[in-house]
Every structure is written in C-alpha cells, then in structure tokens.
C-alpha cells in the first residue's frame, strides 16, 4: 500500500485533503491513479487521480472500477480528463503527495 491524498468535502462543505492508503494503478491512459478498497467489508473500490485528489470512479469490485476508468476516458477523452484535473488543481491546489515531496527536497 502507498500513501496518497483524496480531496473530500467535510460537513461544513469545505474541500479538505484526506490521507489514504491505496495501490498505485498502472493504466494505459498515462494518468497518475490510485485504487483503494474503501469498504470495511471489502466490496467498494474507488480510483483517485493523484495530482488533483479527484475521485474518478467507484464500483463494487476492483475489476469494475478499472473498467469504469477506461469507459470514462473513452467517453470524455483524455484531454477532457486532463483539463478537469487541472481545474481541480487550480482551484484546490496540488495534492500534498507532491507538495510534501517538493518541500522535503528543499
């Protein structure tokens, strides 16, 4: 498991970074993705884009979640996905996964 950050909304409606443990997901789209089983009973997988913290897919099984990413990219196109994640980064900032690495290199 690897540490990554998901952008979530708190009860006050504010967006916050939540540290999570997931698995880096190799994919044919060149996206920086993490997949995580978020259900205590083991039946709900979410896929999050690492730079923006944006959840791109959520399905009952790992296989279905991965298939959903492929379907979303096919429907929207990779350029739209990249623009959407850039908008999130512009609005909410870059994931601490990357900003903490930059800080530690200084």
Image: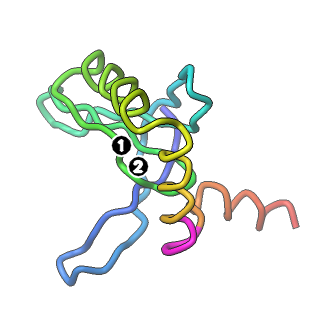
User: Is 11 situated above or below 77?
Assistant: below
User: Is 8 situated above or below 22?
Assistant: below
Q: Secondary structure at mark 2?
A: strand
Q: Which mark is residue 56?
A: 1
Q: Is residue 17 left or right of residue 12?
A: right
Q: Residue at x 43, y 32 (%)?
A: 73
Are there few (<14), some (14-19), or many (20+) residues within 10 Å of tag 2?
some
Q: Residue at x 50, y 26 (%)?
A: 25
User: Is 68 situated above or below 13?
Assistant: above
Are there few (<14), some (14-19), or many (20+) residues within 10 Å of tag 1?
some
Q: Nearer the viewer, residue 78 or 10?
A: 78
Which residue in the rendered view is the most extreme toward the right? 106
Q: Is residue 30 left or right of residue 85?
A: right
Q: Which mark is residue 20?
A: 2
Q: Secondary structure at mark 1?
A: strand
Q: Nearer the viewer, residue 50 or 68?
A: 68
Identify the image quadrant of residue 83: bottom right
Q: Which residues are magenta?
A: 89-93
Which residue in the rendered view is the most extreme toward the top? 63
């Amino acid at each position: 498991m690897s540490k990554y950050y998901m952008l979530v909304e708190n009860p006050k409606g504010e967006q916050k970074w939540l540290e999570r443990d997931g698995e880096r997901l190799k994919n044919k789209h060149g996206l920086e993705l993490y997949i995580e089983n978020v259900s205590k009973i083991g039946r709900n997988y979410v896929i999050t884009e690492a730079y923006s913290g944006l959840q791109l897919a959520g399905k009952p099984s790992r296989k279905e979640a991965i298939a959903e990413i492929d379907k979303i990219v096919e429907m929207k196109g990779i350029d739209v996905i990249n623009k959407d994640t850039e908008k999130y980064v512009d609005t909410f900032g870059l994931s601490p996964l990357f900003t903490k690495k930059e800080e530690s290199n200084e």
